[in-house]
Image (spheres, rainbow, N blue to C red):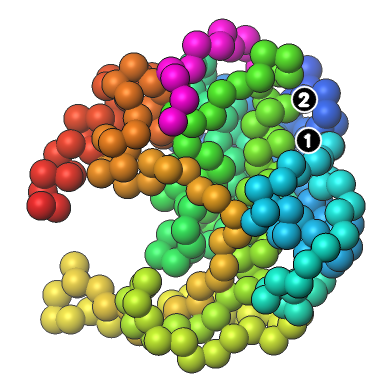
Amino acid sequence: MGAAVTTARTPYQAASLAVDYPQFAQTRKPDQTTATSAWVGEIQPFSSDESARGFLHRLEEGKTIWLHGGRLREELPMKAHWADPLLVNMTVRCRLLILIQPLPAHPRAYLLDPLFAEHYGLVHPHPRYDQLIEYEGKRIPGLCIYSASEFEYDPRRDDISKFLNQLTIYTARHLVWLRTRQLFRGFPPNGVLLRVLLPGETLINDMPSVVFAGDPRRMIMLDYWSGYWPGPTARAFNPATHLKFIGPNQQCWCGSGSTYKSCHRPLDKAKLAISR
């Protein structure tokens, strides 16, 4: 993990969200939020199914991902990947909500369409259920697009453009996750495979089925849909790895903009102690 983030951050633009993303327009802030402004716009990562396959290959091979304004550059696949046949109808336009937080906190992002459903907090590898909001009559978890402790802002670009670039890559990976979902029985990650989505198949209901073992606090998941999340993830992803890889004076992984020691470090230490 790199050194503590020291790059000075400047206030976010008020007139427009970002020069590279003019498709976002300011909107009403959700109730009960600390956001200073809210923005809604669309991102379409893929121009074709082939570009989605090319993205998957480049990501898994550790190659540079080129993008601009919410669109990934057309990259044709050079090798075969097991998920290629499933990446059908990938030219999805994704409607997103961005909440700008008071500095030094990082922005927050929410996928409105296709909806990042509340129950994805149970099966998705990278939700921010701690950033759940109510919007347009739905409860929507935030998107965990990076670990702030590993994310350094490039001083040559404004903060929000860099954030939206990361969001575009997250959205592309999420579309791969949606198209590669499989039906399992048993609690993640040790479920038994029951069925694989057909290429281009749309799920009407992907909510897990659960039972409560005599106690409402003891949930047992029976059947659930879970997809493939491509490419590398943050090294620090739970209390144990947070404490191992994040220095006390680095930014906290949560995106608050505070140092780890002043934010989640005491809580992570407590959680780790309880789990042992």
* Magenta extent: 1-12
- x%, y% of residue 133? 48, 46
Q: Position of residue 201 (x, y in %)?
A: 71, 83
Q: Position of residue 53 (x, y in %)?
A: 78, 64
Q: Specify whether residue 169 is painted magenta.
A: no
Identify the image quadrant of the N terminus: top left
Does residue 69 lie above or below 56 as drawn?
above
How would you rate the neighbour count of disc 2 (Cα within 10 Å): few for under 14, some for 14-19, many for 20 or more? many
Q: Is 8 contained in the magenta span?
A: yes
Q: At 74% from the left edge and 42% from the top edge, which residue is drawn?
A: 64
Q: Could you tell me the amino acid type at mark 2?
A: Ala
What element does badge 2 sit on? loop
- Looking at the image, can residue 12 be seen? yes
The reply to whether discs 2 and 1 touch (Cβ–Cβ < 8 Å) is: yes
Q: How would you rate the neighbour count of disc 1 (Cα within 10 Å): few for under 14, some for 14-19, many for 20 or more?
A: some
Amino acid tagged 1: Phe
Judging depth in this view, the residue of 3 and 205 nearest the camera is 3
Magenta stretch, overall SS: loop
Q: Secondary structure at mark 1?
A: loop
Q: Which residue is mark 2?
A: 18
Q: Seen in the image, is 230 located left or right of residue 189?
A: right
The residue beneath circle 1 is 24
Q: Residue furthest bottom?
A: 194
* Residue occupying the point 65% across, 38% down: 166
Q: Earlier in the sequence, mark 2 or mark 1?
A: 2
Q: CA distance from mark 2 to mark 1?
A: 8 Å
Question: Residue shown at 83%/29% (left/top)?
Answer: 20
The label nearer to you, 2 versus 1, is 2
